[in-house]
Image (cartoon, coloured by chain):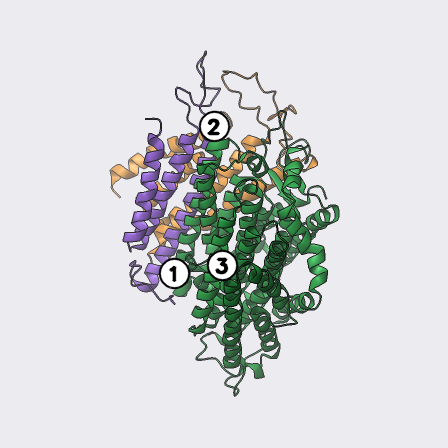
Chain colours: A green, B purple, C orange
Amino acid sequence: MVHAPILAIAIPLLGAFALPILAKLNRRARDLWAVGIALVTLVFGLAVAGQVFASGKPLVYTLGAPSPTASVTEGGFPIRIVLVVDALGAFAGIIALLAGAIGLFYSLQYLAEEEGKTLGTSLLLLLWAGILGLVYTGDLFNFFVFLEITSIAACALIGYRVWESRPPEAAFKTMAMYTLGGLLVLISVGILYGEYDALNIAYLSKLITGTLLDKLALGLLLGGLLMKAGAVPAHMWAPDAYGEAPAMATIVLVANTQAAIYALLRVVFTLFGGALATPGIGWLIASLGTVTVLVAVLMAVVQRHLGRLVAYGAVSQLGYMLLAVGVGVVAAGKGFGEVALKGGIFHMINDLASVGLLFLVIGAIRRAVGSVDLLSLGGLGHTLRWESGFFLLGALALAGIPPLNGFASKFLIYESTFKASPILAAIAVLSSILLLAVVVRAFHGVFLGPKARDVGPAPWGMLVAMGVLAVIIVVFGLFPGFFIERMVSPAVQALLGGRAAYLAAVLGG
Amino acid sequence: MGNMPFVVSMILVGLGFLALIVRRNLIKLAIGISVIEMGVNLFLVSLGYVRGGIAPIYTYAPPGFKEMVFPTPQALTLTAIVIGLATTALMLAFAVVIYRHRGTLDAGKIRELKG
Amino acid sequence: MSVVVRTVTRVILPVALAFGAYVIMHGHLTPGGGFQGGAVTASIVALLVVVYGGARLKGAKGWFAVLEDVGALAFVLLAFLGIGATFFRNVLAGSGGLFGAPVPQLGPNPGALDTAGTLPLMNWAVGLKVIAGLGSVVLLLSLFGREDG
């Protein structure tokens, strides 16, 4: 289990490359292989999280060294590539593991053989490995490489239905934005390397003093990551991508966005935490988050494509997380800053569950009916009973209705934002109410009304995948305290007070 | 003169962004992104340059050499080039697919997805 | 294409192959390695596409796909070799045998091909992947515009 961090990245990678060869031999073997890879990855990923949460210390794994903990050579310089998993990384890893496993399981019956199931599954595994690498890595250049792996795999998945005219357009747009974001990150990596001759996040963090170049690097990193996450004004790709990608990929894309938020936290609190985590940066992130919430919810009102409607809902949830991160930076030393970070980090997993569930239901509708245009849908609740229940559950959780999980995290965000700025909090609450109206109207339009057509229910595998998310929504909503205590609080502590522990784990002493 | 490579790389990045703003052809957008990429790569490579240094290869090193340029930025650049190749190939492939569906590469006319 | 192009291609082909193999094989000693050598070799595919047209090379598509997977798989498995110590640990270096000759002293030297442990093998794995991947990119882009692509 010492090797668990790297195995959680390497096993899905291995699975992705072996999958096409297995598919040539036997299709059943390929499906079994995909399930097996998913299970093994899940075991190793959860083992990493378990070790980190149990010991309370960051886990360090050095690649290519005589032993995994030998991260530093003589002279105290970390020359090798390291993986560092602290509580925040473990939490983001859990989100990625959940999304990947559910997406993979869903895809087994969702993808048709003639649609290139082998390629789709293989890309999904690649994206999964990329996200896990992104959240586990402790090296800035590796971070860029994993960022680009996720970009390429994600765009290939978005444009997966090349026989239709809209997905390639969405994929091109997304690719352009992702690549630009990645290049901004690369410039900033270059600046930091040129200044300090190091790429290790912990080592850099020790050296960064807050010069003009550091500020430039921080600005570029924030810009690149916000582009990758899809915050306003760089949000144009997100609704296209979420709306057009196949459902099993969309949930992993949402996890990809959460990974960008994770990276944002890591950059602001760990990398630049010593010198540059100023309230100004916090206000910038918080106001961007509020604008994102507002714009996305207003855009959701006018959508008639169900996928795009929910996609704007997903973008608005991203705004809530940014708002929480911003407030957390503004009030880093105060109590409500901690509450804001708790809300934001808890919202990452809640958002994945609710938005992911909605997208999986939309995938099932699309598979059954062949269209997700709100004007042509109606009365599906008569035949798609499970799906309608799941959709309602996901929609209410998305809008933050108690006692579902969305409420638990959003309440923390409202509460803390109100202390920082009542205006931002008011906008956030009002947007949430508007979002509720939008999703309830969508539910009404799609599932209620007279029975219009006969459609078959989704296969059991897809229903089970949705059911897991539904259980998470309900359980996290009923017992939020338990999960905040066990998983979210350590992650917040790793951000606020854990920088020293992070540096000590990598650099020793 | 020592900062010339940095100036040139930032000019390249600027030109690439200019192409992204004023051009509407999908292929030219891909070229614009590639130009930005080249600018960034030039920036990375020039970071490791040491005046008077030789290539960091012991096999070719002349006897009695003094300094070598720094090899790490070159490795980084190489990785960035490989990644750039993959993104460019993917973007061009999508451009071809879009052209087959719509019969045009004009980003102004391909706007099924908006709002 | 004309007779001149075809003849020149036939002459260049073995030279380019040899050069590509050289660049891949000496990746741990000189500038180059899997990606660069693979790109040199894949340029042969581009040349063949120009000379004979993509349609005649369509049969290579499936082979490229398999080779690409084999290359990637070999790379990951080579990295797994070191799992006794750590992932990516170069276990073959200094162990004697074909790849484990002792490394000469630091400083100018003529270069010894057999000193780098798993690195040359990884170079070959990457080279294989790049040849196949870049080859299929070139091939597929040339086939895209056609009805039968």
Say which of marks 1 and 2 sits in front. 2
Question: Which is more toward the observer, A435 or A147?
Answer: A435
Q: Chain of mark 1?
A: A
Q: Secondary structure at mark 1?
A: helix
The quadrant of the picture occupied by the C terminus of chain A is: top right
Q: Which mark is residue A289?
A: 3
Query: Which residue is tagged 2?
Result: B71
Do the residues bearing badges 1 and 3 touch, measured as CB atoms within 8 Å? no
Do the residues bearing badges 3 and 2 touch, measured as CB atoms within 8 Å? no
| Residue at mark 1 shares a chain with residue at mark 2 | no
Mark 1, Cα crowd under 10 Å, few <14 / some 14-19 / many 20+, is many
Question: Which is more toward the observer, A334 or A153?
Answer: A334
The quadrant of the picture occupied by the N terminus of chain A is: top right
| Residue at mark 1 shares a chain with residue at mark 3 | yes
Residue occupying the point 48% across, 19% down: B59
Image x and y of residue A464, in percent? 65, 68
| Residue at mark 3 shares a chain with residue at mark 2 | no
Q: Secondary structure at mark 2?
A: helix
Q: CA separation, marks 1 and 3? A: 27 Å
Q: Which mark is residue A169?
A: 1
Amino acid bearing label 1: Glu
Q: Which mark is residue A259?
A: none
Say which of marks 3 and 2 sits in front. 3
Residue occupying the point 62% across, 62% down: A412
Q: Chain of mark 2?
A: B
Placement of A35 over or under A143, stated as above or below? below
The quadrant where residue A33 appears: bottom right
Confirm whether residue A113 shows in the render: no
Q: Secondary structure at mark 3?
A: helix
